[in-house]
């Protein structure tokens, strides 16, 4: 646990404590940690294990099972291209490819400057405005391939 | 606080007078409501609402006009929506810069802003009222009751629209009577399986034990379906009420909502509704002065499609990997923390208050022999009116696609409609007059699923669509059982081979074998239904598979290896815009000048072309084609 700062240890312990009264709270604890720090590295899993009594193996199994949890830090801006069916039949695949080309990364990867992560999302339920792209929670409707460079630039220059 | 049925009735009477007053313009007041669903929020409906409030304040209309948000109107492709009461005028595709005009012209001048009205695509007529729009005419709203009508963050509006009337009646009945009512209504699970809800409840009721649970499955994973999200965003109290009624019926004291983490707005509104209901005494100890107590909790998913499978969902709530459990024992016997548990989908629970409020017969009068009530469909893909529609079971596909959906855009031809998402199949022109219900869709080789309905036109390649679903399933297979883990992978590899033009006739035989093996041997519904899109496209579109394999052609020009862009030289004006747009430098000028044109035509070098399509979208003369 050498890498964890004092404040992180306090915060994570507090998150574990938050759900002390709940039956089987592991998912809630991990969600809160993911939201707070953007990733759940092994050191953090060890701390959660110590606080909850759940084995590291089990925690690691859960973290790697769900796509929402990440072992590595995500970029400052997480670009989620919806690849649900409604978006796909309206050309979301090409939009995704364009983001990949502009950023020079594949899906699931983060740019070297730590600015962008590109994720393929499975339907965000915004089918009426397909193809949809969600960046840090802001949803862009009816995105065209030609819109992509501008969208990326707007964050890069932000 | 509402402590007794009498207090509830008094409160409901006051709230409904207030709500109706808003719609009818009591005391000369006008009301502006805006859609606050995810689709419209992403088109700035929140900012537009704030601007309305600001402009109304500046014009000194605060006493005469109210502004608030409501849930999803369902007609997402036309959003954001603004509705004005008491005239019931519906403005669509409203932008920030339209706000001043609506306030000046309509709210002050009493004149309709014609240019923002919906225009019927067929007649070209402008339509002022929502109910007169074809998209809404054939709908009947039971599960979507209150969505697009009430403010989902204000419990008084929910009560005013009839919330908790169903529970109030249920609490006067014996538990078995409540189950009988749901059985009599013929309600079947809306999440995909179509299992009779009342029977599920009966199983859990029959189990002995102090601790039982109700779980609401809000892990809506079918890509293209978003009715559960809209219900939770539009009328969360209705789902809570359905859950409390279920809890009373089976004898549970606690209920769990399991909602996708991808639905932040739904989760927020659900939390607000739970908090308000608890403060009003409508959740917690001794509900409406009875001995019945019930508490509701929320658990969030973390991005795993398989958690929509009920036993995987229970594992996820238990803090484990979301892998399905073998059944039996069924959850009704051993579910959450090994206690009897019923797992019902959001839309199913949203129907329950209606059944208890109005009686089983009122619900069962809609629908077909074995599929009662209504069903919400998410119309998407290549269709004019994209959105959520709720229609009686037994409505035909033709009514759904053409009357409500407004047909296929850009004069293209309808090819197929995919229902049931990655577990379902596609239905072609010959099935357009088939009535939609649980059993009929299965008989025709597809399934209801959760109600996703994606329309494909002639530009969609069905082999590519099958590959798309298989990629999805392959990614989402939990890996617990071999037939699903390996079978989906092999099927995906084979489909990829075919779409790349490397397929052989043997691949089709292999696919058939894999389809059967995965279907017959997988542990849960995810694997058992994973091969449906392949089986169904192979049945209806074998010609497309053969074109890919034998002719090395993709008839819809989708599969990149099997198509190319070409400039029709006689149509080319030689403007050179395509060459500028080409990222690969694959376009150059030829020596050929077409008759009547001044400049020499351009041509694409197939060896250099990366098939991005940039040239085609740049060409103003439609001189570039795919072949």
Image (cartoon, coloured by chain):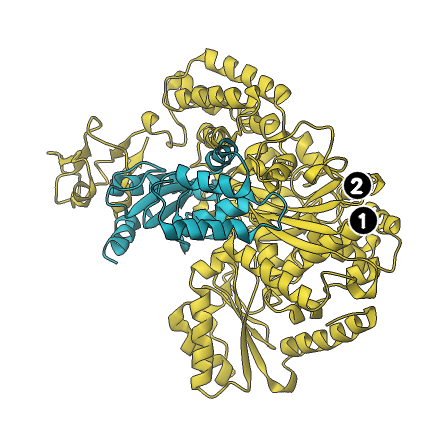
Tell me where residue B623 sits by quadrant. top left
Mark 2 or mark 1, earlier in chain: 2
Tell me where residue B320 sits by quadrant. top right
Position in image of residue A37 (x %, y %): 39, 49
Identify the subunit bearing mark 1: B
Residue at 47% across, 78% down: B53
Q: Which is nearer the eye, B79 or B428?
A: B79
Name the disc covering residue B204, or none.
2
Q: CA distance from mark 2 to mark 1?
A: 9 Å
Identify the subunit bearing mark 2: B
Q: Does B330 sit left or right of B228 as displayed?
A: right
Q: Which is nearer the eye, A30 or B594?
A: A30
Is residue B446 visible from the viewing direction of this image?
yes
Q: Which is nearer the eye, B188 or A15?
A: A15
Quarter of the image with the N terminus of chain B is bottom right
Q: Does B345 sit left or right of B355 as displayed?
A: left
Q: Which residue is mark 1?
A: B251
Residue at 41% across, 21% down: B498
Which element carries disc 1, helix, strand or loop? loop
Q: Which is nearer the eye, B280 or B242?
A: B280
In the rendered structure, the colour chosen for chain B is yellow
């Amino acid at each position: 646990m050498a890498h964890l700062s004092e404040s992180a240890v306090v915060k994570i312990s507090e998150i574990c404590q938050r759900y002390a009264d709940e039956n089987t709270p592991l998912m809630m604890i991990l969600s809160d940690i993911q939201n707070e720090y953007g990733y759940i590295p092994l050191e953090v899993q060890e701390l959660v294990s110590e606080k909850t009594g759940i084995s590291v193996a089990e925690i690691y199994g859960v973290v790697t099972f769900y796509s929402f949890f990440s072992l590595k830090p995500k970029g400052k801006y997480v670009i989620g291209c919806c690849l649900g069916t409604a978006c796909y039949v309206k050309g979301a695949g090409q939009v995704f490819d364009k983001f990949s080309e502009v950023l020079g990364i594949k899906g699931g990867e983060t740019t070297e400057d730590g600015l962008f992560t590109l994720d393929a999302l499975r339907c965000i339920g915004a089918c009426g405005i397909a193809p949809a792209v969600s960046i840090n929670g802001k949803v862009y409707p009816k995105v065209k391939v030609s819109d992509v460079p501008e969208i990326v630039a707007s964050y890069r220059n932000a | 606080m509402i402590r007794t049925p009498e207090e509830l009735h008094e409160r409901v009477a006051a709230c409904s007078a207030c709500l109706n007053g808003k719609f009818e313009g009591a005391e000369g007041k006008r009301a502006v409501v805006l859609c606050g669903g995810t689709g419209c929020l992403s088109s700035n409906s929140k900012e537009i609402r704030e601007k309305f409030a600001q402009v109304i304040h500046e014009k000194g209309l605060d006493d005469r006009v109210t502004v608030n948000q409501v849930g999803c109107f369902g007609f997402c492709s036309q959003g954001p929506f603004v509705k004005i009461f008491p005239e019931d005028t519906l403005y669509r595709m409203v932008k920030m810069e339209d706000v001043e005009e609506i306030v000046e012209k309509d709210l002050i001048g009493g004149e309709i802003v014609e240019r923002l009205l919906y225009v019927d695509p067929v007649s070209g007529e402008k339509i002022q009222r929502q109910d007169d729009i074809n998209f809404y005419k054939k709908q009947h709203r039971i599960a979507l009751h209150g969505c697009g009508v009430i403010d989902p963050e204000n419990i008084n509006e929910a009560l005013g629209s009839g919330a908790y009337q169903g529970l109030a009646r249920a609490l006067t009945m014996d538990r078995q009577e409540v189950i009988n009512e749901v059985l009599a209504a013929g309600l079947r699970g809306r999440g995909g399986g179509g299992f009779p809800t009342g029977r599920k409840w009966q199983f859990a009721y029959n189990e002995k034990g102090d601790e039982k649970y109700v779980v609401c499955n809000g892990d809506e994973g079918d890509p293209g379906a978003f009715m559960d999200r809209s219900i939770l965003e539009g009328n969360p109290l209705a789902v809570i009420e359905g859950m409390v009624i279920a809890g009373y019926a089976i004898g549970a004291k606690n209920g769990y909502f399991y909602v996708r983490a991808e639905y932040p707005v739904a989760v927020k509104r659900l939390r607000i509704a739970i908090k308000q209901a608890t403060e009003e005494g409508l959740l917690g100890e001794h509900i409406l002065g009875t001995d019945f107590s019930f508490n509701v909790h929320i658990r969030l998913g973390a991005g795993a499609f398989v958690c929509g499978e009920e036993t995987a969902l229970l594992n996820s709530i238990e803090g484990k990997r979301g892998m399905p459990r073998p059944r039996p024992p069924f959850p009704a016997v051993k579910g959450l923390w090994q206690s009897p548990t019923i797992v019902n989908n959001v839309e199913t629970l949203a129907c329950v208050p209606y059944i208890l409020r109005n009686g089983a017969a009122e619900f069962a009068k809609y629908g077909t022999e074995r599929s009662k009530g209504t069903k919400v469909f998410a119309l998407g893909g290549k269709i004019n009116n994209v959105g959520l529609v709720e229609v009686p079971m037994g409505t035909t596909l033709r009514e759904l696609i053409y009357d409500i959906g407004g047909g296929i855009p850009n004069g293209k031809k309808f090819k197929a409609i995919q229902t049931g998402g990655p577990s379902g199949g596609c239905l072609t022109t010959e099935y357009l007059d088939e009535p939609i219900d649980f059993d009929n869709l299965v008989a025709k080789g597809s399934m209801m699923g959760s109600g996703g309905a994606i329309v494909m036109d002639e530009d969609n390649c069905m082999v590519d669509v099958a590959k798309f679903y298989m990629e999805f399933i392959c990614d989402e297979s939990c890996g617990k059982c071999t037939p699903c883990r390996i079978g989906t992978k092999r099927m995906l590899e084979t489909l990829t081979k075919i779409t790349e033009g490397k397929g052989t006739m043997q691949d089709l035989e292999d696919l058939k074998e894999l389809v059967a093996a995965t279907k017959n041997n997988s542990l849960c519904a995810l694997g058992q239904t994973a091969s449906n899109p392949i089986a169904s496209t192979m049945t209806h579109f074998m010609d497309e598979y053969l074109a890919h394999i034998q002719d090395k052609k993709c008839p819809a020009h989708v599969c990149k290896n099997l198509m190319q862009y070409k400039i029709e030289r006689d149509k080319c004006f030689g403007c050179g815009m395509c060459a500028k747009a080409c990222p690969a430098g694959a376009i150059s000028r030829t020596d050929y000048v077409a008759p009547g044109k001044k400049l020499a035509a351009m041509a694409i070098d197939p060896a250099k072309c990366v098939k991005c399509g940039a040239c085609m979208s740049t060409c103003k003369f439609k001189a570039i084609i795919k072949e």
